[in-house]
Image (cartoon, rainbow, N blue to C red):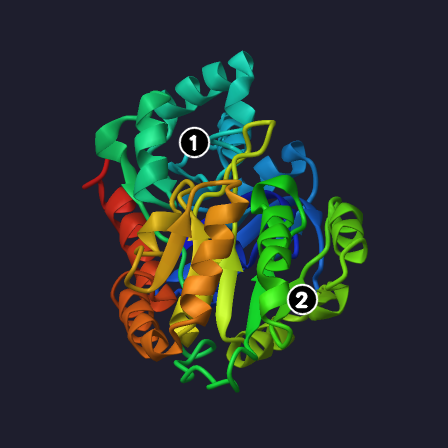
Amino acid sequence: MVKTGLYTARFLDLSETFIYEPLRLFQRTETLVYAWQRRHADVFPYAACRVGQDKFLSAALRQDKIQLLHAHYGYMGVAALGLLRKYPVPLLTSFYGLDVYQHTRNPFYRWQLRRLFRRGRLFLACSEKMRGDLLRLGAPPDKTVVIYGGADLRKFPYVPNPCPPHQAATILLCGRLVEKKGFIYGIRAFLKIAPHYPRLRLKIIGTGRLAESCKHEVESSTFKNQIEFLGNKTHAEYIEELKHCHLFLAPSVTARNGDCEGLPTVLIEAAAIGRPLLATWHSGIPEIVQDGRNGLLSPEKDVEALAANIEKLLNKPEQWPAYSAHGRALVEAQFDLQKQAAKIENLYSAVLSGSIS
């Protein structure tokens, strides 16, 4: 049994299921968590968790006889270099989005990343697009690999799309209400077509600093009764909403501060359940949304194009089964969380055996 450490600032924020879920599926690995803060323990129960400042965590690593440390986010990989100064074990770093796009606007952070790229053992990107961006930042090609996020296919079974009465579909938006999620553009696109589809509904799951501005956009519209803000939902409640919606919307954009998505897990999960997807040509999204096959893509912030794509799918429900089947097959082939967890464990073994040095 390989003994590894997971290093992160906060274990965990509500949106970080992509860090938590693989832990449950490891078969050959005992993982202890090392974090500066413990958050949402009721949502993410995990007994083997050490919480404290780096001086304490460094001693805990040695005491626990950790063989390898896996840092989550590039800035935690940078922090781990100091943590491992007195206990040098191999370091892996996973990147997710803001650590590649927003933070790299800071020259000092870019310098820190170059130092990490020299000293770290392996670097994990969550999409092919991100891998290319990491290489441009100086990551070594032979040590930079893609590990997709995934959906647990037992939790996200294929559910045939509920056939709605004519024009009575439900579209689901889910995520943090922050700029890069592009919810405001999704709302505007929906409101653009709402007059022609009085039985169409948009449900929005999530909270965030842009919640009030999104609600204000809706409240000022004649068609506000067609949009429902659900707030935060438990994971189980979110899955139920996925099963009962007809289309899934993710209008992601590049934020003004440079922040971008990696590859949104919600798109993988919606595809797993069999929902046609509506999204944007943004970051790694085209790797899960194949335009014209399991969904439709539009340019970022293009409300007209997004509205046209929503209408295109609404008006051709006979195409939904093909979109659904292709999406599920794609997830089973490339985004099965069980397989992705096994790939991570294989990387751990390869690093410790010396085949990746």
Q: Which mark sits nearer the N-terminus, 1 or 2? A: 2
Task: Give the residue displayed 72% in from the left and 55% down from the top.
Answer: 207
Dot label at residue 88: 1
- Residue 38 at least partly seen: yes
Dot label at residue 314: none
Viewer-side residue, 154 vs 39: 154
Task: Give the residue displayed 53% in from the left and 77% down from the top.
Answer: 167
User: Type of residue at label 1?
Assistant: Pro
Q: Is 159 positioned to the left or the right of 206 in the image?
A: left
Residue 234 on image: x %, y %: 67, 71
Quadrant housing residue 14: bottom right
Viewer-side residue, 24 vs 240: 240
Task: Give the residue displayed 71% in from the left and 59% down from the top.
Answer: 40
Q: Is 46 positioned to the left or the right of 88 in the image?
A: right
Quadrant housing residue 203: bottom right
- The quarter of the picture where the C terminus appears is top left
- Mark 2 highlights which residue? 43
* 174 up-or-down from 144: above or below: below
User: Type of residue at label 2?
Assistant: Val
Q: Secondary structure at mark 2?
A: loop
- Residue 1 at least partly seen: no
Residue 339 on image: x %, y %: 30, 64
Closer to the eye: label 1 or 2: 2
Quadrant housing residue 35: top right
Q: Secondary structure at mark 1?
A: loop
**What is the C-alpha distance between the residues marked 1 and 2?**
33 Å
Residue 72 on image: x %, y %: 50, 42
- The quarter of the picture where the N terminus appears is bottom left
